[in-house]
Structures are given as C-alpha cells and as structure tokens.
Amino acid sequence: MKGKTNAMRILDKAGLTYEMYSYDPADGKIDGLSAAEKIGKEADSVFKTLVTIGTDKQIYVFVIPVAAELDLKKAAKAAGAKKLDMIPVKDIQKYTGYIRGGCSPIGMKKLYPTFLDARTISRESIVVSAGKIGKQMELKTADLISVTHAVTAHEVIK
C-alpha cells in the first residue's frame, strides 16, 4: 500500500495484521463518529485516541469509544496522576508526531502510558486511526495492547 503511516509500519514490522479503511475528509467531518459512519462501521467498534498531560508534564494516552467523552478526573485516577488536562490541539503534533483527526495510539514519538477503555477487552478487534486523516485501521485488540503496552482503564468516560 502506498503512503504507509508510522502506525502501519510498526504493525508490519511486528508481523501483525490489520485492515485498512479510507474515507474522504474533504467535507471537514473528521471526528470519530463521522469517520465511523463514512467507513460503514458501528460507532461502538470505532475508538478515538485522546492525549492528555498531567501536572507533572507526563503524557498519557486514552483510547475510548468515539461516542464517549473522557472524564479527566477519572482518567487521572486511572493513570495515578494528580490532575490531567487535554493536550492543546496546537501541541498534539509536538508530542505525538500526529495531528488532530489523525492521531493513532500506535507509533507516537514516544511510547506513552496508554489506557484502553475497559469495553475494548470484550472486543476481538477495534478500529483506530491509522495515523492520518482519512485513514482508519481495524486490528485485534490484543495486538493493539501488545504494540502500545496499554493497560485497561475502568470508568474513565462520562
């Protein structure tokens, strides 16, 4: 496939399989719910990657259903942090190497502590950003955990 993202290269190198989905972002609708609709997937199978920062300047990544909203207090508790804030959009690329709407939990600049919403565990596979606006990929939940060293987070959404 032409134009592989860092996330795809990491999965390829690890010998892990994934299925690619593409959608047209020209209408500006790049949020997770729109992406799920455009690729023909149920919203509960598509997950978004949210990047937070603690008062200690540590970055924490949360992978939650696209229709859900992260509860920063609960997320901080799950991460063992005093307080978390969302990374400002202007800083996403600086920390992750990705841009808003194309932020994959795989292949960030550093391997940050990553937390998967507990609902992912019951799913054999989930869809996440492939690391570029207009690109999504479906992979086994266990493979996502393997490459991100993610842990399950209970009750981090509102």
Image: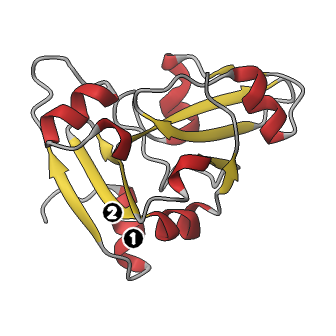
User: Which residue is at a point 60% across and 39% down the rendered structure image?
Assistant: 62
Q: Is residue 73 left or right of residue 121?
A: right
Q: Are marks 2 and 1 in contact (CB under 8 Å)?
A: yes
Q: Gap between marks 2 and 1, in whole Å?
A: 5 Å
Q: Is residue 79 above or below residue 26?
A: below
Q: Is residue 124 above or below residue 88?
A: below
* Horizontal and vertical percent position of residue 31: 31, 24
Q: Amino acid at mark 2?
A: Met
* Horizontal and vertical percent position of residue 92: 52, 28
User: Which residue is at a point 83% across and 22% down the rendered structure image?
Assistant: 83
The image's colouring method is secondary structure
**Helix or strand or loop: what does disc 1 sit on?**
helix
Quadrant assignment for the N terminus: bottom left
Q: Is residue 117 visible?
A: no
Query: Nearest the camera: 5 or 118?
Result: 118
Q: Which residue is mark 1?
A: 11
Query: Nearest the camera: 157 or 114?
Result: 157
Q: Is residue 45 left or right of residue 60?
A: left
**Helix or strand or loop: what does disc 2 sit on?**
helix
Residue count near mark 1 (Cα–Cα under 10 Å), binned few <14, some 14–19, many ≥20: some
